Image (cartoon, helix red, strand yellow):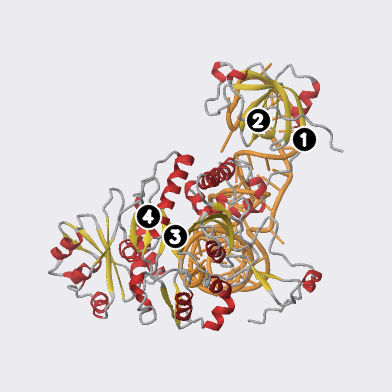
Amino acid sequence: MEEAFMQRTVTCGDLRAADEGKSVILNGWVHRDRNHGALHFINLRDRYGLTQIVVDDDADENLQKAASELKLEYCIAVKGTVRRRPDDMINHDMPTGEIEVKAEKIEILSKCDVLPFMIDEENSAREDLRLRYRYLDLRTNGMQKRIALRHEIVKAIREYFYKTDFLEIETPTLIRSTPEGARDFLVPSRIYPGKFFALPQSPQLYKQLLMVSGFDKYFQIARCYRDEDPRGDRQLEFTQLDIEMSYVKRDDVLALMEDLFGSVFRSVLSIELPAHFRRLSYHDAMNTYGSDKPDLRFGIEIHDAASFASLSTFNAFTETLSEGGYVKYIVAPHKDGFDYTRKYLAELESAAKIYGAHGLAWMKAENGSISGGVSKFFQGNEAKVLEETGAKDGDVILLVAHKDWKKCCTSMGAVRSRLGADLGVIKPGYEFCWIIDFPLFEYNEDEGHWEAAHHMFSMPQAEYLDTLESDPGSVKGDLYDLVLNGYELASGSIRIHDVELQKRIFRICNIPDEVSMERFGFLLDAFRFSPPPHGGIAPGIDRLCMIIAGESSIKEVIAFPKNTAALSPMDDCPSPVDPKQLEELHISIVEDSKE
RNA sequence: GAUGGCGUAGUUCAGCAGGUCAGAGCACCGGAUUGUCAAUCCGGAAGUCGGCGGUUCAAGCCCGCCCGUCAUCGCCA
């Protein structure tokens, strides 16, 4: 049997000067231990804060002995009396810095081995080590704050919806596999040999069925799973706020999100967001910022260079233009103390090349003219270049030519991002924007057919209904993404609720009727029974928390994340399983025959 | 699948034309210490320099392959 231990009456964050004289019991971890021999200071830590414990020179033998045994991170109980610190001993950096607790009894609740890393922010350990000992990493102040922040954000979201007509409804996590889109995680069925469930990539179809059922406003904080390579802002499993509404048009969904985020930012950060977020079409976002998730905390916009690039004698420009391609430019602004060296321009070029640019041309605005780089190909047209670009002395004009519009835009977008970060022009704060009017289809070169750019259940905009089949590439959908500080925060659409239209979309995506009936028959069936028009959206909770926490990896706001190798170093999974388990599941492992 | 960065005591890092290069802080162990607050002082233990192979009189350092990890591209409707 466990012996009774001294149980806390206050936390390590509670005590103030007004508590002087109180007899208290604290539980926590030894955060720091300053032993002066007959005098001993301990910073005791729990998730509420730090409190200084003093073992005074009048301590009895037991207390002295207990104090001298203490090591970092021992879990202890302390009984003592609150006393004011002398005025010149007050620690103004600690909320509890006015007081200390004079220990009368210390009980070691459990001891701690040599730590794999220090539990503090100054000596942050490598990420693989942090993940291996995640439970210790979570003890650090930063992780404690971020996990608590996440709680506050999710709480604010739920509180917002609980004041409305929205119903929170759970949908299954063992569902039918649909091979479109991301790879599914599969779960073998023991009862039905050879058959599988999938873990949901999102509750998409279920929330649409809930609309058919008459739950006209639904939300859920849903765990989703995608078997794709993780990234800084992507994990195998992640959490999204899933929302669907009946009888709505695009702007109703957008307005709801603006209201929701306004409410969340007000309650979590005491920040007042604009009532409406800026809207950019996909086309404009790509053209101007080179991304469908532009970071609008800084300018440095991309422009079309055709008007002056066509005057140059630079083959890469003129040939690209004559082939119907694109030349775009950015004016990298002059900044005192920042040199656009050859080396730096080469770095920008390699950033552009990652996105398919063949090169990054440059020329400097100097002495009222242009010089260096490709300027020599503009002889006689220097003034025209300056006039068109508006470049001033010290600015650098950066250009990409590419026959592919998207590659031209995104490679310039990569350059823009680098410039924004390196020039330090990114304003603090939160810049939301909507990206709307996405193309509904994208051509898959490898497969040789059209695919849904977003997903197959999104409504084409009305004016394209007659040309879906004849010109899929030009069809815009009733799709919208919410972007925050360069991250895709939410993605949604007005959905199709018509069997025939849905089948047309499937066919364009190379899914014949027999196959779509087999895979999505339940949805198509449901649409036979008076589905209401509906639409929705799904903001990513992890990314929202990451951005608010000021982090660049969602691992920082997830208690037990996987690493980028899609492993959990802590519990070492995925792991092999007992052959008996496999046998029950009618599964045998086939050795990889490639090589 | 591809490209790049990183890998040196428990940990964070330093190390260099290839030759006192096996080092420092913190942690750990022993001791001292009455007002600290990242306490201080003295002493100690601790490393297959990610692995394997190569070049060389000599490799932590150079080369090749591999492994791990992070970032990015592909991928992620």
The answer for how far apart the CA atoms under marks 1 and 3 are is 59 Å
Local SS, label 2: loop
On the picture, is A564 further left or further right than B10? left
Label for residue A433?
Answer: 4
Closer to us: mark 1 or mark 2?
Answer: 2
Q: Earlier in the sequence, mark 1 or mark 2?
A: 2
Q: Position of residue B44 (x, y in %)?
A: 72, 40
- Which residue is denoted by mark 2 in the rendering? A11
- Which residue is denoted by mark 3 in the rendering? A247
Question: Quick check: marks 1 and 2 in contact, CB under 8 Å?
Answer: no
Indicate whether A470 appears above or below A46: below
On the picture, is B3 further left or further right than A374? right
| Viewer-nearest residue: A450 or A286 | A450
Q: Amino acid at mark 2?
A: Thr
- Which residue is denoted by mark 1 in the rendering? A109
| Viewer-nearest residue: A176 or A151 | A176
Question: Quick check: marks 3 and 2 in contact, CB under 8 Å?
Answer: no
Counting every numbered tag in the picture gives: 4
Q: Position of residue A325 (x, y in %)?
A: 28, 76
Quadrant occupied by the C terminus of chain A = bottom right
Q: Residue at x 31, y 58 (%)?
A: A341
Closer to us: mark 1 or mark 3?
Answer: 3
